[in-house]
Image (cartoon, rainbow, N blue to C red):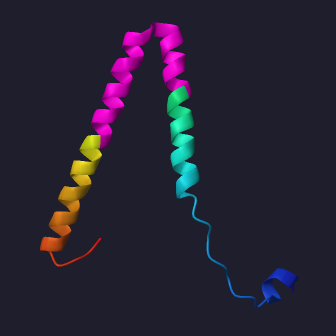
Amino acid sequence: MSEAIMDNKPVGRAPNYTTACIAMFGVNITWVLVLIWAIWGLIAAMLLAIGVNHLMERARVWAAARQAASIRRGKQI
C-alpha cells in the first residue's frame, strides 16, 4: 500500500482564501475596465462599472431577503 494511505496524521484545516479572492477581484475588474476604456471609451467603462455596482447592491438585498426568509422558517443560514 502507498505511504499516503497508511499515514494516520489528522487532516489540517483548509486555508482561508477570502482576502486573496477579494484582492484578485479588484485586480481583475480594474484591468477589464481599463481594457474596455481603451477599446470603447470612458462612457462604456463607466456604464459597466455602474452596472456591476448595481448588481452587487442587488445581491446584498437578495441575500438579506433570503436570510430573513430562512429565519422566518426557523433556520439559520
User: Residue 38: image x %, image y %?
Assistant: 53, 10
Can you say whether 45 is above or below 77 in the image? above
The part of the image, by quadrant, that contains residue 75 is bottom left
Question: Does residue 77 appear left or right of residue 38 in this picture?
Answer: left
Query: In this orientation, does residue 17 appear?
Result: yes
Q: Quadrant of residue 23?
A: top right
Look at 38% across and 26% down and name the residue there. 49
Q: Is residue 68 magenta?
A: no
Position in image of residue 28 (x %, y %): 55, 34
Q: Position of residue 56 (x, y in %)?
A: 32, 41
Residue at 22% over, 57% down: 64
Residue 8 located left or right of residue 54:
right
Q: Is residue 76 above or below residue 7?
A: above
Is 22 left or right of 54, judged from the image as shown?
Answer: right
In the rendered structure, which segment of residues is drawn in magenta? 31-56
Residue 33 lies, with reference to residue 15, above or below; the image says above
Q: Which quadrant is home to the C terminus? A: bottom left
Determine if residue 2 is in view: no
Please report the residue visible at 32 percent of the width from the left and 26 percent of the height from the top: 50
Q: Nearer the viewer, residue 24 or 2?
A: 24
